[in-house]
Image: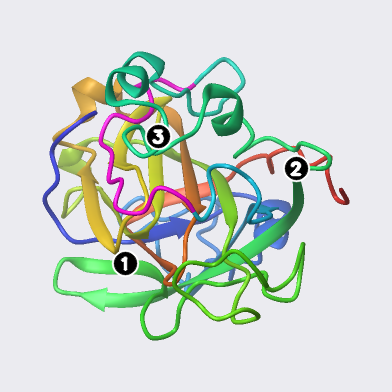
């Protein structure tokens, strides 16, 4: 797990072509003659950003959902994404903590279902979120915030629908409580001397949240827990993340809402993120 959490921020998504802009629902920046973004202000003209990811809905009968409350677990996943671009469970640590409540997960097999389409186990669908521009003393940031009292329950009318039974801390039919969300974007890392402020990405929410930059774990808020925050300063962590000025890198976010009764989800960043390929969906119906 990388450290270097400092500054305040938010998440930007911008395409360099009109087709990318159309795909992501961005407001196109003003023409700069050669069609490229203003190197001095890459956020010029962008008032909101839409990002589409994949949400996967689960039923309460899945062994990892509506179980293991209070299992805030650092290092629950390995520091590197797996070959298929998914988080890899830290098996040795889970075994040492004790499968179940200690590890916060039932087994390798149950965890591997979270971000993969498994017919009969989950139902997947695209989900778009919109980040709004906010002006700060350090410059513009882009924010998506669904947190108390306006919680993040985006599929109450989709997937398996409202959770009706087996709930510890909620009445039946209140929300669809058990789902995961996967987002993939990319960005170009620029030299610090070319910017007025550090590049920072911040997430606040519950339950599990893992952010990987260049395939490396950058934010680690694993386990079933209340609202928590963590952020990464990319300039301070550039060496650990393997970032070089002028090169483009992947940023992936993996979220899980596993337990009643709250679901908080907040992104802030000043990174200029571009659309990446939507994760594959195959289980549109169970």
Q: Which residue is mark 3?
A: 212
Q: Is residue 35 left or right of residue 209?
A: right
Relative image position of residue 209 (x, y in whole percent): 39, 47
- Per the image, label 1 sits on a secondary structure element best described as strand
Relative image position of residue 13 (x, y in whole percent): 50, 56
Bin the neighbour count of mark 3 within 10 Å (Cα to Cα): few under 14, some 14-19, many 20 and up: many
Label whose residue precedes the other's in the sequence (3 or 1): 1
Residue 141 badge:
1
Distance CA(mark 1)–CA(mark 2) = 38 Å
Q: Please check the rendered image and state whether residue 78 is part of the magenta-colored stretch, yes or no.
A: yes
Q: Please check the rendered image and state whether residue 180 is part of the magenta-colored stretch, yes or no.
A: no
Q: Which residue is mark 2?
A: 121
Label whose residue precedes the other's in the sequence (2 or 3): 2
Tell me: residue 205, above or below residue 238.
Answer: below
- State the extent of the magenta-drawn residues as a range: 67-81
Who is closer to the viewer here, 23 or 62?
Answer: 62
- Per the image, label 2 sits on a secondary structure element best described as loop
Distance CA(mark 2)–CA(mark 3) = 25 Å
Give the mark toward the camera: 3 or 1. 3
Tell me: residue 207, above or below residue 175.
Answer: above
Who is closer to the viewer here, 255 or 191?
Answer: 255
Give the mark toward the camera: 2 or 3. 2
């Amino acid at each position: 797990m990388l450290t270097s959490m400092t500054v305040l921020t938010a998440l930007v998504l911008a395409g360099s072509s009109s087709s990318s802009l159309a795909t992501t629902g961005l407001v196109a920046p003003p023409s700069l003659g050669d069609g490229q973004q203003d190197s001095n202000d890459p956020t010029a003209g962008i008032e909101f950003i839409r990002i589409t990811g994949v949400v996967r809905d689960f039923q309460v009968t899945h062994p990892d959902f509506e179980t293991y409350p209070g299992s805030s677990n650092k290092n629950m996943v390995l520091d590197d994404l797996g070959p298929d671009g998914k988080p890899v469970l830290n098996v040795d640590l889970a075994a040492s903590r004790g499968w179940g409540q200690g590890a916060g997960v039932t087994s390798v097999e149950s965890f591997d279902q979270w971000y993969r389409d498994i017919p009969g186990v989950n139902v997947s669908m695209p989900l778009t979120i919109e980040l709004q521009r906010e002006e700060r003393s350090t410059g513009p940031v882009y924010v998506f915030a669904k947190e108390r009292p306006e919680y993040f329950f985006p599929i109450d009318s989709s997937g398996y629908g409202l959770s009706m039974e087996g709930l510890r801390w909620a009445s039946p039919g209140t929300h669809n409580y058990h789902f995961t969300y996967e987002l993939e974007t990319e960005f170009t890392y620029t030299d610090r001397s070319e910017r007025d402020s550090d590049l920072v990405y911040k997430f606040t929410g519950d339950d599990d949240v893992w952010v990987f930059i260049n395939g490396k774990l950058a934010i680690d808020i694993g386990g079933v827990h209340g609202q928590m925050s963590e952020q990464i300063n990319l300039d301070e962590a550039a060496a650990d993340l393997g970032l070089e000025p002028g090169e483009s890198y992947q940023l992936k976010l993996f979220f899980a809402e596993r337990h009643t009764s709250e679901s908080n989800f907040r992104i802030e960043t000043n990174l200029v993120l571009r659309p990446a390929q939507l994760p594959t969906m195959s289980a549109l119906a169970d």
